[in-house]
Image (spheres, rainbow, N blue to C red):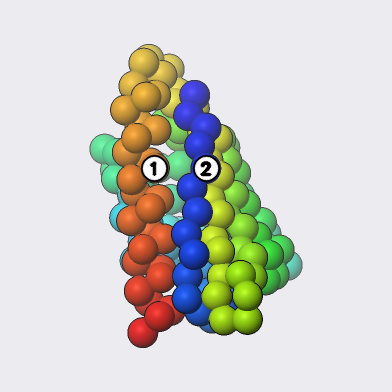
């Protein structure tokens, strides 16, 4: 099981950062572990989708819940990993934001023995994604 948290201060207002974060179809641009997304259904602020991840081009099923201007919760329900990613955005002064990301995932089957390595990989990937998001909104 891998559980960790990371955050990044971004020199842009919450509204600008939210535009990028909440466009969940753009995730492959920023989250490079996500290869492609196929939306199955959308209802209000809930999206059911299939995501191809970088690990052996595996498919994960996800339910994404969006709370406007606050958070995005991704429940990973099927695939080689299961668990949750929660992205929360908060204001930091008048013109800055802080994006917090919390992961709580577990690898299926024998893959569990690689949890420590996967945690390190996911943490690095998450920090890289936050840096890419920051560059996008600070243009």
At mark 2, the secondary structure is strand
Residue closest to the eye, 78 or 2:
2
Q: Residue furthest front?
A: 93
Q: Could you say which disc has been placed on residue 51 in the image?
A: none
Query: Residue 68 vs residue 114: left or right?
Result: right
Query: Residue 54 vs residue 109: left or right?
Result: left
Give the residue drawn at x 40%, y 50%: 126
Q: Return the x and y of residue 28 as percentages of the image width and height.
A: 36, 61
Quick one: label 2 or label 1, which is nearer the N terminus? 2
Q: Return the x and y of residue 94 as percentages of the image width and height.
A: 63, 81
Residue closest to the eye, 13 or 64:
13
**Residue 131 visible to the viewer:** yes
**Residue under numbered circle 2:** 5
- Classify mark 2: residues with Cα within 10 Å, few (<14), some (14-19) or many (20+): some
**Residue under numbered circle 1:** 123
Q: Return the x and y of residue 54 as percentages of the image width and height.
A: 29, 45
Query: Residue 79 vs residue 68: left or right?
Result: left
Measure how far apart labels 2 and 1 are at the Cα level. Answer: 8 Å
- For residue 119, what is the image quadrant? top left
- Position of 19 relative to 40 (above/below): below
Give the residue drawn at x 37%, y 24%: 116
């Amino acid at each position: 099981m891998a559980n960790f948290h990371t955050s990044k201060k971004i020199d842009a207002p919450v509204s600008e950062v939210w535009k990028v974060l909440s466009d969940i179809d753009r995730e492959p641009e920023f989250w490079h572990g996500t290869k492609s997304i196929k939306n199955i259904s959308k209802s209000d602020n809930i999206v059911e989708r299939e995501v191809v991840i970088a690990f052996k081009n595996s498919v994960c099923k996800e339910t994404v819940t969006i709370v406007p201007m606050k958070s995005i919760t991704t429940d990973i329900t099927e695939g080689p990993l299961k668990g949750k990613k929660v992205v929360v955005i908060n204001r930091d002064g008048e013109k800055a934001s802080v994006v917090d990301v919390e992961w709580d995932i577990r690898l299926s089957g024998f893959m569990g023995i690689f949890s420590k390595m996967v945690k390190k990989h996911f943490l690095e990937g998450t920090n890289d994604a936050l840096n890419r998001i920051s560059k996008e909104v600070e243009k």
